[in-house]
Image (cartoon, rainbow, N blue to C red):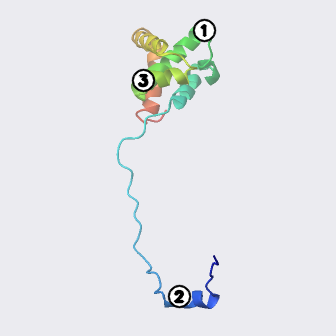
Amino acid sequence: MRAYRASPALYARIIAAQPPAPVVTAPIVLAPMAGPPAPPLITDIMRHVSFEMGIAVADLTSPCRDARLVRARSAVSWLAYHGAKKPYRLIGRALGGRDVSSVTNQLRKAEKLRRSDPAFLQVTDKIFATLVAGEPA
């Protein structure tokens, strides 16, 4: 079977016979985005906690059970659950692959620390206000 091609002269006649495309000159107005801001990411929470508590972000995901790291992981868990509304599974995955029971224990520990330790309460409230409520640090 032979394929036929139109000549350039035929293309020119077809294009010349078509009416020009209309030009739209209406202004484009972008509306501001409505609704609440997106919750913070767990990685953002981890960076803030590591900065405030003076530890490395990589230490939060390590298997080390040092008391400073346990406190920091508890703070991350509390902020991610109560501030960012993240599920236990995602919090555990972000903290080095910990399981759901580890995260629930960290949340219990964080609640206990918030009641008994004013410094822990101050740090978690400061990060909560910065990340979740959008207040400046």
Q: Position of residue 97 (x, y in %)?
A: 56, 19
Q: Secondary structure at mark 1?
A: loop
Does residue 47 sit above or below 117 in this rendering?
below
Does residue 16 sit above or below 121 in this rendering?
below
Q: Secondary structure at mark 3?
A: helix
Q: Residue furthest left?
A: 35
What is the distance, in whole Å, between disc 2 and disc 3 at their CAs? 65 Å
Circles 2, 3 touching at the beta carbon (< 8 Å):
no
Q: Is residue 52 left or right of residue 122?
A: right
* Residue that badge 3 annotates: 81
Q: Position of residue 75 (x, y in %)?
A: 49, 18
Residue drawn 64% across and 78% down?
Answer: 2
Closer-to-camera residue (10/112): 10
* Residue that badge 1 annotates: 66
Which mark is in front, 2 or 3?
2
Circles 3, 1 touching at the beta carbon (< 8 Å):
no
Crowd around label 3: few <14 · some 14–19 · many ≥20 (10 Å): some
Can you see residue 123? no
* Residue that badge 2 annotates: 14
Q: Secondary structure at mark 2?
A: helix
